[in-house]
Image (cartoon, helix red, strand yellow):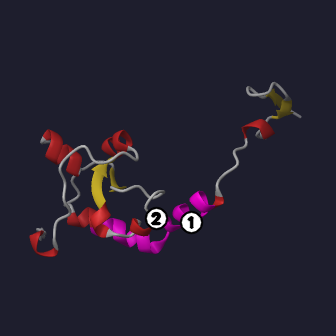
Amino acid sequence: MRTKICSGCGKRIPYTATCQCKKRVRNKATEGETDKLMKSSRWKKLRLRVLDRDGGYCQRCLIKFGIIETANMTVHHIKNRRDYPELIFDESNLCCLCRTCNSQLGTKELDFNWKAPQEDEREFVL
């Protein structure tokens, strides 16, 4: 049987195993509830609605840098999911960002002036 040396504690363990010293204890409330919600059909439908609402453009690139970015789009929670679980499905708490901008912002507040468009302000492209 092939083995490897754990880089954390130096013990010899099976090659395909993860050492006990590296296993994280996860907070069930944080991981279980919010992560399950992010895989729900409700979230997937809302995500598509927000992407459509924002025209599929990264709002940060558009407003802050004047660039139209449409690749690798994500939906960003303005007020983070952990601290504001009641706002997970609130459309006014969501905006469209490219993966780069979403990673740069992380859980920080937006660094550009953005406001969710109202129903009558939306532009529909045919």
Mark-to-mark CA distance, 1 and 2 = 9 Å
125 relative to 57 in the view: left or right = left
Residue 22, x across and y down, in percent: 72, 38
In the picture, measured across the screen, residue 75 lies left or right of residue 84, that is left
Marks 1 & 2, CB-CB < 8 Å contact? yes
- The residue to which callout 1 is attached is 33
Between marks 1 and 2 in the image, the one whose residue lies nearer the viewer: 2
Q: Horizontally, is 111 left or right of 126 in the view?
A: right
What's the residue at 32%, 48% (across, down)? 109
Q: What's the amino acid at mark 2? A: Pro
User: In percent of the image, x 89 and y 34: which residue is there?
Assistant: 1
Q: How many labels does the image show?
A: 2
- Considering only vertical position in the picture, is 70 above or below 55? above
Q: Mark 2 points at which residue?
A: 85
Does residue 67 sit above or below 42 in this rendering? Answer: above
Q: Does 10 appear above or below 80? A: above
Instruction: Return the x and y of residue 99 as percentages of the image width and height.
Output: 35, 45
In the orientation shown, which residue stands out farthest toward the right?
A: 1
Q: Which mark is residue 101?
A: none
Secondary structure mostly taken by the magenta-highlighted segment of the chain: helix
For the residue marked with disc 1, what is the amino acid?
Glu
Residue 44 within the magenta-colored segment of the rendering: yes
- Secondary structure beneath disc 1? helix
**Which residues fall within the magenta stretch?**
29-49
Depth order, front residue of 4/96: 96
